[in-house]
Image (tube, rainbow, N blue to C red):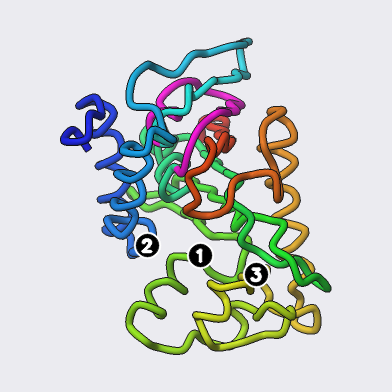
Amino acid sequence: MTAVGTKQHHARSLAEVLVEGDHRGHYSHGLNRMDMYVKDIQTGICAKDGEPVVEKESEATALVDGKNLLGPVANDVGIGWVVAHNSNHYGIAGYYAMQALKENMIGMSFTNTSPLVVPTRAKECTLGTNPISVAAPAKDGDSFVLDMATSAVAIGKVELHERRGDPIPEGWGCDPLGKITTDPKRVLTGGGLVPVGGSEATGGYKGYGLGMMVEVLCGILAGAQYSKYIRTWKVTDRVANLVHFVLPSCEI
């Protein structure tokens, strides 16, 4: 990242998130994403200069302007209920929730994303994978960490299957007609992911509801981009203006 002009401490923040993603088995969000970050810097669609700015702050809340910097950099500021807008892809959601564990606190982290999910009874991608994460400390150094997309899977997992020439499991995605498919190419070219739960018959509407919850807490609450108004995945014709919600909660 420093080779394309990113500040060293910004590159370090990104590196920590990517390594943690691979370490925890989220290979779709580890070094697999490096090429995307580099291209965003090279095209100028992601800023490499500047620092995040806290626009509003109270004892328990903060609104942070990420200044269109790398996603992990925009989340280095604030405790309590923090919403960071004007940001970019921030890696695994669990990384930020787990920061609270170091202080023996409960952490939560959500983010909206490019529209990649076809809601229940729809044919068009209008929601992001919108991951949610909750981390809570337990006894003897153990902890509970939930880190999941509100889609059936992350789009990176479909990309990995397509790259290997393997079919995807049934219930991951749909074709351009909204029908469940096991062909990753159909998902990536005109189709989309389905919400966690799969089809309507298997409870996909619950994942649809969770994804919409994240959209409300992130994009809509922050007055930033949301739903299909966020730029298309890997299209660099405009800034992403993603929003991240981070909530370090009370001490346990």
Indicate whether residue 86 is drawn in magenta: yes
Earlier-in-chain disc, 2 versus 3:
2
The residue wearing badge 2 is 26
Residue located at (74% from left, 66% from top)? 124
Q: Nearer the viewer, residue 76 or 112?
A: 112
Numbered range of the magenta stretch: 72-89
Q: Amino acid at mark 3?
A: Val
The residue wearing badge 3 is 196
- Rate crowding at label 3 as few (under 14), some (14 to 19) or many (20 or more) other CA atoms within 10 Å: many
Q: Nearer the viewer, residue 223 or 144?
A: 223
Give yes or no for contact between labels 2 and 3 (Cβ–Cβ under 8 Å).
no
Picture coordinates of residue 199, whole percent (x, y): 74, 80
The residue wearing badge 1 is 154
Quadrant hosting residue 40: top left
Quadrant hosting residue 195: bottom right
Question: In the image, is 95 to the left or to the right of 200?
Answer: left
